């Protein structure tokens, strides 16, 4: 038994669907491509979902102050961009000083923090730069643990 709502489903779908401008062109292109397998090789490559990243800007080496030696050492040892080494050194300095001050927020006091995000391809030595920058923190933690025991 058919209900009064089960009528012609295609006509219901057509009434509910409002095509976007140009959709007919896209739909016809897909139907042509699917019907002729030899035309697949002539289709253009898909458009990437993201733009290429520009190269990193040079860091102001003359204004690094006490961080200059550490940034240069990380850059020389790892062959990573100086900006990556600078971020690792700044994150380590932030970690080292976090317990010294708080910042007042709308919801009360919170630790003074610096959040860093590295956008780099695999193999660009992000972890290596962080390990080198954090080595003094690790050494201090090990010494404090040894003193405690």
Image (tube, helix red, strand yellow):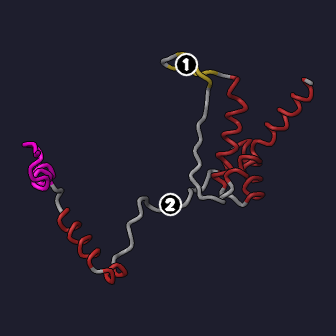
The verdict on residue 103 being magenta is no
> Taking 24 as reference, is 104 above or below it?
above
Residue 63: x percent and y percent?
65, 46
Inter-mark Cα distance, 2 to 1: 36 Å
Task: Give the quadrant of the C terminus.
Answer: top right
Toward the viewer: 12 or 119? 12
> Taking 117 as reference, is 111 above or below it?
above
> Taking 26 as reference, is 32 above or below it?
below
The verdict on residue 17 being magenta is yes
Q: Residue at x 89, y 32 (%)?
A: 143
Q: Residue at x 34, y 81 (%)?
A: 42
Label 1's element? strand
Residue at the left extreme, as displayed: 4
Count residues near mark 2 (Cα–Cα under 10 Å), then give few for <14, some for 14-19, many for 20+.
Answer: few
> Residue tagged by mark 1?
104
Residue 130: x percent and y percent?
71, 46
Q: Which mark is residue 54?
A: 2
Residue 57: x percent and y percent?
56, 56
Q: Which mark is residue 26?
A: none
Q: Which residues are magenta?
A: 1-18
> Taking 147 as reference, is 108 above or below it?
above
């Amino acid at each position: 038994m058919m209900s009064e709502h089960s009528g012609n489903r295609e006509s219901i779908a057509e009434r509910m669907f409002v095509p976007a401008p140009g959709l007919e062109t896209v739909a016809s292109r897909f139907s042509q491509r699917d019907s002729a397998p030899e035309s697949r090789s002539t289709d253009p490559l898909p458009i990437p979902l993201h733009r290429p990243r520009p190269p990193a800007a040079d860091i102001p080496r003359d204004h690094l102050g006490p961080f200059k030696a550490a940034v240069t050492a990380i850059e020389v040892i790892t062959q990573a961009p100086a900006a990556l080494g600078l971020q690792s050194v700044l994150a380590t300095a932030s970690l080292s000083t976090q317990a010294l001050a708080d910042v007042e927020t709308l919801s009360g006091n919170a630790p003074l923090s610096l959040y860093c995000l590295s956008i780099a391809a695999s193999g660009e030595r992000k972890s290596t730069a962080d390990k080198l920058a954090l080595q003094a923190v690790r050494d201090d933690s090990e010494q404090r643990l040894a003193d405690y025991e």
